[in-house]
Amino acid sequence: GEVFGAYLSSEYVRALETAALLDLPNANWEGDPFLRERNFGRMSVLTHTEREERFKAEMEARKRDSFYWTPPSGESLADVSIRVDLVLDSLAQRDLHPSSTIIVSHFNVMQVIRTRIEAIRQVEFEDKLINVPEELKIKNAAVIHYTRIDPETKEIAPTYRWMRIAVPWLGGKQANPPWMEITYRYVTNQDIISHVPYD
């Protein structure tokens, strides 16, 4: 739609500028400090190469569990999840007309929003968000679009059931990708046991 019930943005200048450049009609943006990018602590403003050189042990530890890994003096993605939950909970408590919301934020926050909305578990994080085909990766200026409306039948589901990641500046199929159905999955006792390492 052309009008949203809520317009939220990180308070970082680059996010606010992106929000304004969208030039959405009747937009009334709210800056939300909980939507700020992940804090990389002492690794902030370093290139990936510099991080590998200066923080070799920490970067090696990241490979074991990138979701709970915490940069020196920074935030883990699990920490960012707490902030994202506060934002999503506040939206659920509002009486929004229309009920849709647009959020302008940053890469790591977008990853966490996906984990929360799609119920992606920590053990699935790498497989569902990192080690995925190029067209499913979150890129700069990407738009993640969630809907409850079935793209085929137009029936409305009680929760988000479809999503797509569009990257308009890439053009072609990436600018207008197909919808993907979100599959919510509960875990069985056996699923849990299979992830527990035994000596």
Image (cartoon, helix red, strand yellow):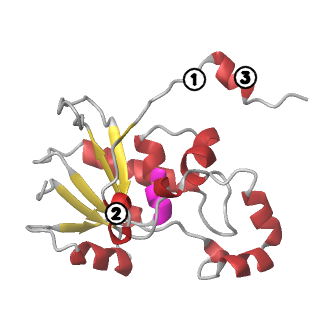
Determine crowd level at label 1: few under 14, some 14-19, many 20+ residues with C-alpha closer than 10 A. few
Q: Position of residue 9 (x, y in %)?
A: 30, 67
Name the residue located 55 percent from the left edge and 69 percent from the top edge: 39
Q: Is residue 160 above or below residue 61?
A: above
Gap in Å between the C-alphas at discs 3 and 1? Answer: 10 Å
Q: Is residue 109 above or below residue 153?
A: below
Residue 41 sits in quarter:
bottom right
Residue kind at label 1, given as amino acid type: Val
* Secondary structure of the residue carrying numbered label 2: helix
Chain-order first, disc 3 or disc 1:
1
Q: Which mark is residue 193?
A: 3
* Secondary structure of the residue carrying numbered label 3: helix
Determine crowd level at label 3: few under 14, some 14-19, many 20+ residues with C-alpha closer than 10 A. few
The single residue placed furthest to the front in the displayed view is 172
Q: Which mark is residue 187?
A: 1
Horizontal relation, residue 125 to residue 174: left or right = right
Is 132 included in the stretch rendered in magenta?
A: no
Q: Which residues are magenta?
A: 107-112
Residue 75 sits in quarter:
bottom right
Residue kind at label 2, given as amino acid type: Gly
Gap in Å between the C-alphas at discs 1 and 2? Answer: 37 Å
Count of all numbered marks drawn on residues in the image:
3
